[in-house]
Amino acid sequence: MATIKDVANQAGVSVATVSRVLNGNGYVHEDTRSKVEQSIRELNYTPNEVARSLYKRKSKLIGLLLPDIMNPYFPQLARGVEDEMQENDYRLIFGNSDESKKKEMEYIQTFVQNNVVGVISSTNDPDADMYTGLNIPVVFLDRTSSDRPSVYADGRQGGRIAAEEIVRRGSKAVTVIQGPADVRPAQERFEGAVEVLEQQAAAYQVLKTTSFSLTDAEEFAQKVFSEYPDTDGIIASNDIMASAVVKEAFRLGKRVPEDVQIIGFDDILLSRLLAPPLSTIHQPAYEMGREAARLLIGLIEGQRIEKSNIEFSVEFIERQTTRKVES
Amino acid sequence: MATIKDVANQAGVSVATVSRVLNGNGYVHEDTRSKVEQSIRELNYTPNEVARSLYKRKSKLIGLLLPDIMNPYFPQLARGVEDEMQENDYRLIFGNSDESKKKEMEYIQTFVQNNVVGVISSTNDPDADMYTGLNIPVVFLDRTSSDRPSVYADGRQGGRIAAEEIVRRGSKAVTVIQGPADVRPAQERFEGAVEVLEQQAAAYQVLKTTSFSLTDAEEFAQKVFSEYPDTDGIIASNDIMASAVVKEAFRLGKRVPEDVQIIGFDDILLSRLLAPPLSTIHQPAYEMGREAARLLIGLIEGQRIEKSNIEFSVEFIERQTTRKVES
DNA sequence: TTGTAGGCGTTATCAG
DNA sequence: CTGATAACGCCTACAA
């Protein structure tokens, strides 16, 4: 790799001059500039970001920490973040935390070791020392934080809507699947749903689950019907769970939505490819990722941020795992 | 952030000594060592990787370039890579190329600018200058390259198997969906399928598609049946396409697999959650990602590599979009 | 308008 | 066993 020195030699000037044309600051004679630019081209020179980063004490890198990229919801967030970042010349160091504090800490550490200028994280504990102690901007994505910048969907409202819709469409024995206890958005959805069910004095039961993994989803789906054989409406903790439930319902010969209605959460891309397509609560994941990136960039570049808690609203997507009803 | 100098001051030694205890090389008295270690703890010091990287001219970073993390196949690759890398203390700079040469080049450039020690890339053109000119190891993932390190599944064989299975199970008017022309693995599958269909003198037609995006998939799915209304067996270019076809078949009142059989490709996680679950050609994506990472690490750390083209075999997963048949 | 030199945080070399 | 110090590639005073 050619260095700035090589370019300087080639062009017969000092490194300072090359640096000036590189960064477009300071005065440099037009002739000198073109000479330098030519040498840059000839040598195929690109500045070493590491040296830059060392000198300036900051890089063009952003740390992105997501629970698990294999969960279909997160790629959309990730892609939103990536697109916005790449358009603004930032790059991503990416890690999966598996909702584990240990992995999270390790990644945060390597982020700072690599001089990242900002972090986007889906954590369950925004108030942990590792974040409060950071002296670079952090945006929490898909996680709520009242006092720190965050971008999230209104999960509680989503839970409420799901409950309202399923009751309105005639389910009399609702099962609410409660996602992993330590995953905050899952709990919010759950609470929202229960809130409405209580209000309406509807009959409901709860099934606790401990993971979002696909294999577990199938097990939990079986449990739904074995423990509550007469349930006729299921509010799932996400679309994976919902899909597993749909599948299990079919396996048991139940008709969807005639015998049992099912509502998911997230609206992952494949939900509408299911047969029947899944009714679900839509989160604008890609756009949330982009927004988190925008917010972070604003923070990094020192714009005055008027609003740093951005809540996206969610929306019921009526497809075919819920019954039709007059509006 | 504390620097090595701060630690040295605290401990009353020189930076050289601190560096020695940090890296565990050179002699250092036991008492000195513990003094230093204590200062490290007290100051909560971690070495600046950027400075390290500058001096050593190499980092602990790997560049990972995938076409599109929103396509459900790639997160599995990505996660495999990430897990293996993180266990070996490497971190990932991640980018989406969208199969675009331009984005690809931009990323490769920032990879080298950031002193990455290796690259894993899903490219359609392993022989492009940007790769041949790199002086760091590159592993091509999900893409074939005869003369350069690569990890991929036997797509041609997959295509063959799909064709054999669908014919064997009684389809008489097969439609082969041909994926985007510039995506190599898609073409290999296609060629494999056609090869067998020709051999067996089976009746078949081809539907060309131009993208793997979800919305397009639905359009193409409609086209399948509008252009070939009497088709009774469809070999899809991947599971997304296959799901869209299943859905469209249902919409048209066709029974699957009685009226029309469908075989996908990839075996993404959700394939088995579909109703009916999708028969498909399984690629061990997660394991492929891990293997690519292992291979790359080997290359980086200068092991003598005996075999640098790793082909994974694929396998037919019989689920319920194909008919049962005596074996 | 251009060049010199010091410093960013580490590591490695070479004296002591 | 330990300490100066040069060097990694770049940027920015400051001088010229």
Image (cartoon, coloured by chain):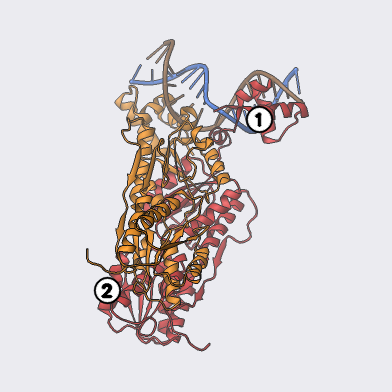
Chain colours: A orange, B red, C blue, D brown
Mark 1–mark 2 distance (CA, rounded to whole Å): 66 Å
Left or right: residue B311 versus residue A85 is right
In the picture provided, is A19 more to the left or to the right than A318?
right
Q: Work out whether residue B302 or residue A263 is closer to the camera in this orientation and state it.
A: A263
As rendered, which of B45 and B59 lies closer to the eye? B45
Q: Residues within 10 Å of mark 1 (few under 14, many from 20)?
A: some
Which residue reaches farthest bottom? B326
Q: Residue furthest front?
A: A201
* B151 w.r.t. A136: above or below: below
Q: Nearer the viewer, residue A240 or B69?
A: A240
Asked whether residue B155 appears in the rendered view, the answer is yes
Look at mark 1 in the image and give the residue it sits on.
B19
Q: Nearer the viewer, mark 1 or mark 2?
A: 2
In the displayed structure, A104 sits above or below A171; it is: above
State the mark number for residue B73.
none
Q: Quadrant of residue B237?
A: bottom left
As drawn, B324 above or below B33: below
Disc 2, SS: helix
Q: Dividing the picture into quarters, in which one does residue B172 lie?
A: bottom left
Pointer 2: what residue?
B223
Residue at horizontal 57 percent and vertical 49 percent from the top? B86
Would you call the spot at circle 2 few (<14 residues within 10 Å), some (14-19), or many (20 or more)? some
